[in-house]
Amino acid sequence: MTKSETIKCNAIIHAAATSAALVGAGLAQLPVCDNAVLVPIQTTMIISLGAVFNINLTKSAAESIAGTAAATLVGRGVSQALVGWIPGVGNIINASTAASITEGLGWIVAKNFEGGKY
């Protein structure tokens, strides 16, 4: 990955992870699934990462790639059910989990796009 690509990927991934953290923190005590908000954030991130590597992705293709992170969302759901309802603690845990998953997904996608795997 070139320095320019790394800088662009950093900006895209960190912006998406920050957005995911805000969603995770903000919806911690609400009995709703925040995946409805997180998936579009991750989909937009994947499409933007594709553009860095001159890969044009449709929304459905990006959603499919994001769907590969479904297993980690199960773990996130468990953590949210166990401590998400506790004010303060739940907000921090949900925010950090959402950000970590989004950050990890972003770098995995960027490395795959760099290697021509998509």
Image: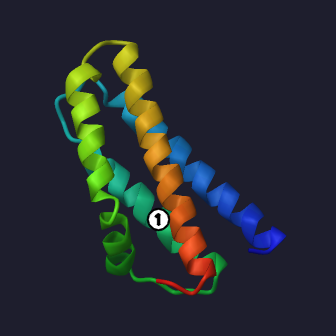
Q: Residue at x 62, y 59 (%)?
A: 12
Q: Is residue 7 left or right of residue 26?
A: right
Q: Residue 22: tell me if it is visible.
A: no
Q: Is residue 72 left or right of residue 25?
A: left
Q: Residue at x 57, y 79 (%)?
A: 113
Q: Position of residue 24 (x, y in %)?
A: 38, 35
Q: Position of residue 91 (x, y in %)?
A: 39, 22
Along the line of sight, the residue nearer the viewer: 96 or 59: 96
Residue at numbered disc 1: 44
SS for callout 1? helix
Answer with the quarter of the image where residue 63 lies: bottom left
The outermost residue toward the top is 87
Mark 1, other Cα within 10 Å: few <14 / some 14–19 / many ≥20: some
Q: Position of residue 13 (x, y in %)?
A: 59, 56
Q: Which of the image's four quarters has the N terminus?
A: bottom right
The outermost residue toward the right is 3
